[in-house]
Amino acid sequence: MKLNRLRNTALVLMFVSFAVMYVGVFWPRTVLPFTLAAGFLILSLAVGIYFRLGAVSVRLPQVECPNCHRMTKIIGREDGCMFCGTPVRLSDE
């Protein structure tokens, strides 16, 4: 759940950055460079989030969901299943 939430946040940031840059086209030409720079910074933040999640996702533990019986990755000790949202805990074995 946390992993999907962070990915969705990065996706929303990408759309926001495109919207900021697109809106700058319709304002006076003096505002355009600032909206392009702001959109680029927001886009860079989204790409950074995706890059970090990709690096972290490789080493996350996988646990079988007790509800849907699919393998899901969890962040921390407790998280939700990426497919059905059921709370999943990392066992202390």
Image (spheres, rainbow, N blue to C red):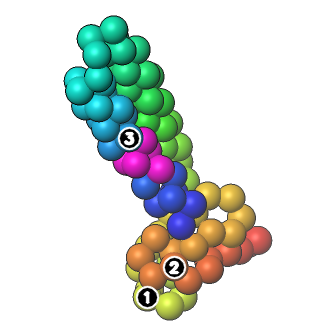
Q: Is residue 28 left or right of residue 35?
A: left
Q: Position of residue 90 (x, y in %)?
A: 68, 70
Q: Nearer the viewer, mark 2 or mark 1?
A: 2
Q: Residue furthest front?
A: 28
Q: Which label sits on residue 85?
A: 2
Q: Which label sits on residue 68?
A: 1
- For marks 3 and 2, the one nearer the N-term is 3
Q: Which label sits on residue 34?
A: none
Q: Residue furthest bottom?
A: 67
Q: How far is disc 3 from disc 1 in space, using C-alphas?
A: 34 Å
Check disc 3 and report its element: helix, strand or loop.
helix
Is residue 42 or residue 76 the one in the foreground? 42
Residue 93 to residue 19: above or below: below
Q: Position of residue 36 (x, y in %)?
A: 33, 19
Q: Is residue 92 left or right of residue 36?
A: right
Is residue 91 or residue 14 the one in the foreground? 14
Q: Quadrant of residue 14?
A: top left
Q: Position of residue 13 (x, y in %)?
A: 42, 41
Residue stretch in magenta:
9-14
Check disc 2 and report its element: helix, strand or loop.
loop
Residue 44 to residue 72: above or below: above
**Residue at the location (35% across, 32% down)?**
20
Judging by the rendered image, the residue that carries numbered circle 3 is: 16
Q: How far is disc 2 from disc 1 in space, using C-alphas?
A: 10 Å
Residue 3 to residue 25: above or below: below
Amino acid marked by disc 2: Gly
